[in-house]
Structures are given as C-alpha cells and as structure tokens.
Image (cartoon, helix red, strand yellow):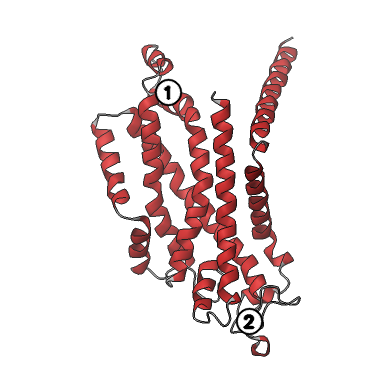
C-alpha cells in the first residue's frame, strides 16, 4: 500500500514538472528572437565542444607556420582567409569559441555562488552589522569600473588565460551580491517569511529553501546575459595583451593581431570580431527569452 502511494506521488511530481516545462517552452517559443538566440547558443556550445573535429585545419590552433599560404584572402580552402603565419583563420575562430566559452563558464561558476550567498545573507539581515560589512565590501569593488579593475589585476600578474579568468572573477561577484540583496530585502517582508519566523523555522531553512527559489528567475536571466559581458571583457584583456597569449587562438588576441594589417588584410581581425558579436548576440537573445518565461509565469 505504501509503495503504491509513493509511486502515485512520484507520478504526480513528474506530471507537474512536465507541465511546468511545457508551459515554459510555450512562452519561450512565442518570441522568434528567443529561438534565434537558442539556436546561436546551441551552435556556439557545439563548436566549443567539437572544435578539434570540425575545424578543417586543426593544426592552425597551435604552433604552426606555413608562409607559402600567408595573407590569403577568403576562399573555399580557407573560408576566413589566412593570417601572417599562414594559419587558417576559420579554424582558429572555431577554437576561439572554445576558449571564450571556457572563460565564461569558469568565471560565472566561481563568481555567482559566493555573490548569491553573500547577497542572500546581507538581504535577510538587512540593517545589521552583517549587512553593513558585506555590502560595503561589495560597494568597494562596484565603485571601480569593471574593465579598469580587471586591467589593474592582470597587469600585476603573468599575462595568461588563467590569470584573466581570476581577474574577471574577482570583479564579477559583487553584482550578484547587489542583485540578491535588492530582491531579498523585499521578499523578507512577505507574509510567508514572517509566518515561518513565528513558527520557529531555522534561518538557514528560510533563506535557502524559501527565499532563494523565489529569486531564481532574475538570477538565471542575469547569468545568461553575463556570458556575453564576460566574453567581451576577456576579449578586451586579450586585445591589450593581458589575456591569452599567442599562439592560443583567443578571439580577442586574434583581433589585436589582425589590427595591424588593416585595411589591407581585413579578414584577419574582422572575422574574429564578428565571432565575438555572434556569441554575445546569441546569449543576449536567450537571456531575454528566459526573462519573458519568468515574467509570464508570475502573472
């Protein structure tokens, strides 16, 4: 009898989750731009995962030189042309997708969790010394422009992609702290939170089991939109020589290297720049679609 009852609960839970996913997809697909963003993001992730297998000239991603094919314009053999060393720009752009996505994944996975937790704690204990310490510390980082702070950090470290990731991570967590602080400051005055406090529920239970799930919509939206910004900041660091170093096929580094050949050999920098814009556009459109889903379900 108990097994039959538990199986009924499992089926009901699965049915509710399926229905919520179906409704989310219904609201998401109503926007053609959101579908375009999903397609772009799917293509970007696919390229990042399988770049070594789909790149026509994978050797161009490493220490490779072929001066006989240097400065060749776009053609069937080299769709994006070749650079000063005879490397296939198209293959390097495909590998550049991998480094850009790796940068975004590492930075957001390291910056978002502590920022969310600190903002949750500060918002719940608003008006106390805990709030004062956390938020004033976050304000110190927010007061400095993000790119300037990242440049300052990477300039005193050895220029490489790992240090670029750490620099961007250190400047990114306060924005999640501020977002969570603003949301939790209003949610903590809701009747269900007050009722749980009167019933003697633990503070940790109220924060992480009741308040945090109600903040997931804006958090997921910001995470999606931040992917483009992180990639743009990482490309800016590489452009000035403080990010990934040659011969790493980083998109920002490729734009910087090709800039000295403009406008004669325009393809060396234009196609990597278009790749950066392609990724940012996709994640921005996807973020707008996710925002619309939560906005529609909250009505």
114 and 232: which is toward the camera: 232
Q: Residue 256 location, x and y as percent?
A: 49, 74
For the point 39% across and 29% down, which residue is it? 184
Alpha-carbon span between mark 2 and mark 1: 57 Å
Foreground residue, 111 or 77?
A: 77
Mark before the other along the chain sequence, 2 or 1? 2
Residue 103 location in percent, x, y? 52, 58
Quadrant of residue 88 within the rendered picture: bottom right
Above or below for 261 versus 34: below
On screen, 135 above or below 205? below
Q: Residues within 10 Å of mark 2 (few under 14, many from 20)?
A: some
Q: Residue furthest bottom?
A: 68
Q: Is residue 106 visible?
A: no
Visible in this render: residue 149? yes
Tags 2 and 1 touching, CB below 8 Å = no
Q: Nearer the viewer, residue 216 or 7?
A: 216
Residue furthest to the top: 1
Residue at 46% from the left image edge and 30% from the top image edge: 212
For the N terminus, the image quarter is top right
Mark nearer the viewer, 2 or 1:
2
Left or right of 127 on screen, residue 294: right
| Residue designated by label 2 | 64
Q: Residue at x 44, y 48 (%)?
A: 111
Tell me if residue 198 comes above or below residue 40 in the rendering: above
On the image, the x and y values in percent for residue 36 come to 66, 48
Q: For the residue carrying disc 1, how many other residues have a C-alpha within 10 Å: few (<14), some (14-19), or many (20+)?
A: some
The quarter of the displayed image where residue 163 is located: bottom left
Which residue is label 1 attached to? Answer: 206
Q: Nearer the viewer, residue 23 or 100?
A: 23
């Amino acid at each position: 009898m108990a097994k039959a009852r538990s199986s009924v609960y499992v089926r009901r839970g699965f049915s509710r989750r399926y229905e919520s996913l179906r409704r989310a997809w219904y609201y998401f697909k109503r926007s053609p731009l959101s579908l375009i963003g999903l397609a772009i993001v799917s293509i970007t992730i696919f390229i990042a995962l399988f770049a070594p297998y789909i790149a026509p000239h994978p050797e161009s991603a490493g220490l490779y030189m072929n001066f006989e094919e240097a400065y060749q314009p776009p053609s069937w053999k080299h769709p994006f042309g070749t650079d000063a060393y005879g490397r296939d720009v198209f293959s390097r752009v495909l590998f550049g997708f991998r480094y850009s996505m790796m940068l975004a994944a590492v930075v957001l996975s390291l910056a978002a969790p502590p920022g969310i937790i600190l903002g949750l704690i500060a918002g719940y204990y608003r008006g106390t010394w805990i709030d004062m310490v956390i938020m004033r510390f976050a304000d110190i980082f927010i007061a400095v422009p993000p790119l300037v702070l990242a440049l300052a950090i990477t300039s005193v470290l050895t220029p490489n992609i790992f240090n670029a990731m750490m620099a961007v991570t250190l400047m990114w967590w306060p924005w999640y702290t501020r977002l969570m602080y603003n949301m939790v400051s209003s949610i903590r005055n809701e009747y269900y939170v007050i009722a749980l406090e009167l019933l003697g529920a633990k503070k940790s239970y109220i924060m992480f089991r009741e308040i945090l799930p109600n903040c997931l919509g804006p958090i997921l939206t910001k995470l999606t939109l931040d992917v483009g910004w992180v990639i743009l900041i990482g490309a800016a660091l590489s452009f000035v020589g403080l990010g990934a170093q040659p011969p790493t096929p980083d998109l920002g580094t490729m734009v910087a290297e090709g800039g000295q050949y403009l406008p004669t050999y325009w393809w060396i920098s234009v196609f990597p720049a278009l790749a950066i814009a392609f990724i940012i556009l996709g994640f921005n459109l996807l973020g707008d679609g996710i925002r619309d889903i939560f906005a529609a379900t909250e009505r």
